[in-house]
Amino acid sequence: MQPLLEVEDLRAHFFTRYGVIKAVDGVSFEIYPGEIVGLAGESGCGKSVTTQCILRILPVPGRIVGGDVRLEGKSLLDLSQEEMREVRGGRISIVLQDALAALNPVITTGRQVADVFQAHTRVFWKEAWQQAVDVMRMVGIPKSEIRAKHYAHEFSGGMQQRTVIAAALICKPDLIIADEPTTALDVTIQMQILNLLKQARQKMGSSVLYISHDLANIARICERVMIMYAGQVVEIASVRDIYSNPLHPYTRGLMACIPPMEGERHCYLPAISGSPPDPLMYPAGCRFEPRCAEAQERCKFESPPLKSVGGGHHVRCF
Amino acid sequence: MKMLRRLATNRLAAAGGVAVLLIVLMAIFAPLISPHDPVDIHIPDRFAPPLSGDYVLGTDEVGRDVLSRIIYGARVSLFVATSAVAGAALIGGGIGVLSGYFGGWVDSILMRIVDVLFAIPTFMIAISVIGIFGRAMPAIIFGLTVAYSPLFARVSYSGAVAVREQLYVEASQAQGASPWRILVQDVLPNIFPLIVVQTTTYVARGILAEASLGFLGLGVQPPTPTWGAMLTLSREYFYHSPTLPVWPGLAILVSVFAFNLFGDGLRDLFDPRAWQAGQ
């Protein structure tokens, strides 16, 4: 099967006055049609920059310096600005974390959802508005024909996130990038938002790239998981494999941080000691080596490649 | 209608709005409501005190009806002030929004020019422009437009820069909106309140500026009645008929105050986040 999205050896660097920050440094993965893929990693590891590269909305002074992003085999990096605008929101859409900030405060929510539709189709306003009301109803906003005339600050946090999701779904995209969509929400709403993303896949066959640092949520909806560390993907595996057989020491460290649901509850959770490397000066060898409990001598000098261990399980470790 | 109802909840703003409306109506219907011809000279009736005969506010040094001249004076004051400020809002505001939103070298050049103009007192700029182009009404309007443009440019520039950094602009971009679409649906609606408020407060200043120019003899020339010129001329007869300068002064005061109140009310009116508190 042809992958929907292929990211190949993607490199995005920020050219700051302090030096070059290699935010994304050789990231490769595929997303297949109808698949929900998780992307996990700590703050600053390059998750969001990867999504900005896919949509080509990297803020200055960032630049894509290498690699390729292909949608159904066609490189997105070769597209003109106009062609790229068709892709953004039309074929690939994004759900941002901070829904209130992602909504324009002085324009009604319905209008913002309808605007996305109108930017991609040549329809009359009335039709775009009707479409917006329908999608808002679909994502669970009650009385959406009335609520669509309300402003973002008049919505609850969950409703705001639903509105943002409605704007992301209205053009029936092939890929939805959900950039930590549940971080600001309470647990019950989180579940509802996760179910919405699942529904989007069922109803429209969209793939979802779900970015989170909450491994529990990733386990709930994803089929495959990618773990990122210091600008690189360190492990890719099915959810089952990553939980039952995590291979990278960093992944194992993350797994150990999940509170146990059985047995002794009143225990200290282990932490991964140290902090991520300075993105201006990565270690010469493996980037996790300074924090790794199992580091060997060669880890200091040789950078391990991302190698397959069979069954679609890849790991960046010797 | 909704907007009008919201405005009505703010009493001061509503009062300002009503006063502005009355002044505008007075200017438009000046020929119908003024009791005399404003330029009609009646030497025998000169320096008539208020409420003498059919001269409600008395007459000036050549026997022209003061009330009629105040009513007609609103035309010049309002026309000069509103067109100068509208021009400044369009030119200055446009420059500010474009350079603030798009940035780059255009921004650097335009905003440096604005900075230079900003360093010169606005009244100086207006006087220099009028000095170059003469004392006709278009020159006065143009002079004030040039003088006020940098102020509008600064305000809309900082507004556009602030909005550009907002997440909803990034969201629009990620949803495939073109730069112009973002300008129209994200940037302009968010800085519109700023510009509207500035427009009304600057109409007030424009009325003052026109009066000051008239006072300096640089305004619209006699016999056309303007509030500023009326103030200048009556000053010379202050000891003889002390009520004479009061009327144009009062007209300036009331209209400036009305526009300021109205502008304050409009700011709240255009910000959906402020509605709930007011309702």
Image (tube, coloured by chain):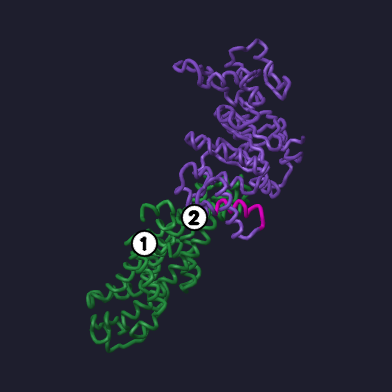
Chain colours: A purple, B green
| Foreground: disc 2 or disc 1 | 2
A202 over B61 or under it: above or below: above
B3 in relation to A132, above or below: below
Would you say the residues marked 2 and 1 are in contact, meaning their CB atoms lie under 8 Å apart? no
Residue A220 makes an appearance in the image = yes
In front here: B16 or B202? B16
Residue A5: in magenta span: no
| Letter of the chain that mark 1 sits on in the rendering | B
Horizontal side of A116 relative to B219 (left or right) equals right
Q: Quadrant of the N terminus of chain A?
A: top right
Q: Is residue A118 magenta?
A: yes
**For the magenta stretch, what is the residue range?**
A111-122
Type of residue at label 1? Answer: Asn
Q: Disc 2 marks which residue? A: A146
Task: Find disc 1 in the rendering and name its residue.
Answer: B260
Amino acid carrying label 2: it is Ile
Quarter of the image with the C terminus of chain A in it: top right
Front in this rendered view, residue A265 or B132: A265
Chain of the residue where label 2 is placed in the rendered structure: A
- The residue closer to the viewer here, B6 or A24, is B6
Say whether residue B190 is visible: no
In this rendering, position of residue B82 left or right of residue A292 = left
**x, y (%) of residue A91?**
68, 45
